[in-house]
Amino acid sequence: MNSQETASAISSTHSSCLRWSRQGWLAFAPPPHEDPSRLVFDAELRNQLERLSRAFRDGRENFEALRLPWRRGLLFSGAAGQGKTAATRAIAHNLGPATPYITIPAHEISHAGLLERAFADALVHLAPATGPSVVILDHLDEMITRMEPHEFFNVLDHALERSRGTLWIATTRHAELLPKTQCVRPGRFDINVRFDGPPLPLREVLLRNLPLGLANDSSFHELLELTEGLTYAHFEELRQICATLLMEGREYEIADAVRGHLRDQLIAGNRQGGASDLTEALGRRIEEVDPRTLQAALNMTDVLGALMEKTLEAAFLKQQEQAGDA
């Protein structure tokens, strides 16, 4: 997609979203259920998102009165499947029907040069916009760990200084990996919005909306107990199960299929369907360790192994000598 086509895609309709890649822009339309009125967040989070949208949309004069560029940064943190991405599109929808929406994914950014290129491309395409726009930094923790933190923030600050009317939203699954004093601060990302799983009352509503066909409340409450720790994405999976069985005329199997799926989620380490938190932490430590340190640890293991073999051999020989003396 060339620059003219991209600018047209941005300005033509609210249904067009753009995703930056090293090969060019990718355009797509958001799912219709990500209209903010149809998202199933709990009331407190929904109200917070609406307040943030309204405050930024109506805050242009406040920034300009203080001789500041009209922009803001938000950090969305939480486990996979908790609705962070859906929330970013809901905010764009709340800002206006023609709000430009650009995503810069971490997997496309391997060094500071690519990050600077992505920001430059985004700002060029946003320049024609007269109203608010949204830029998403997807998986911020991964971007930062792929370069020196000072490089990342130098590039980010340069882009922020040149942006006007832009709401920057960074998402992360591992907020604990971010340098807090550098990320969450005025002028960068001034507020951390935490995304947790649906609370019990909302889980009950979501479960009752499924065509379970249960004969009694005791069976329903048994299923409800199994939803502890589920994400919003898990409930999407449950709806997929129901839709598939209804399509095949097997609605009588829905309750058992849902029960089996809920029980399966308890097996895989955590309720997000991935490895346990301990396993992920160990994996990150291995990735981040200095190769020289790792090699030293391996060498030490060889030394300890040699010492153990020598000790065992000496003990065996001593035992043989004692047996001979007897």
Image (cartoon, helix red, strand yellow):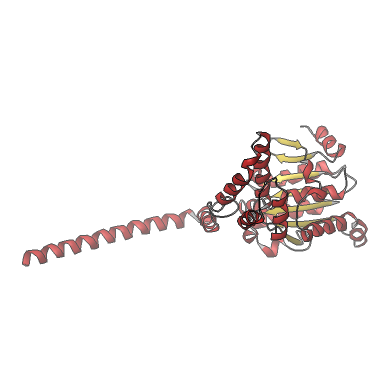
Name the foreground residue: 289 vs 167: 167
Q: Is residue 69 visible?
A: no
Q: Is residue 256 above or below residue 57?
A: above
- 326 displayed left or right of 96: left
Instruction: Report whether residue 34 is seen.
Output: yes
Q: Residue drawn at (65%, 62%), measured in percent from left and top? A: 179
Residue 129 picture quarter: top right
Quadrant containing the C terminus is: bottom left
Give me the residue at 20% from left, 60% from top: 313
Whole-percent x, y for residue 28 in the image = 76, 37
Q: Out of 198 and 80, give the one closest to the viewer.
A: 198
Vertical order, 250 against 163 (above or below): above
Question: Which quarter of the figure is the N terminus placed in?
Answer: top right
Asked where in the image residue 145 lies, by quadrant, the reply is bottom right
Q: Quadrant of residue 60?
A: bottom right
Q: Looking at this view, is 25 or 225 the one in front?
A: 225
Closer-to-camera residue (239/124): 239
Q: Position of residue 98 (x, y in %)?
A: 87, 42
Residue found at x 18% / y 61%: 316
From the viewer's perspective, is 160 left or right of 279? right
Q: Position of residue 162 (x, y in %)?
A: 82, 51
* Residue 256 locus on image (x, y percent): 59, 46
Residue 62 lies left or right of residue 29; in this view the side is: right
- The total of numbered circles placed on residues is 0
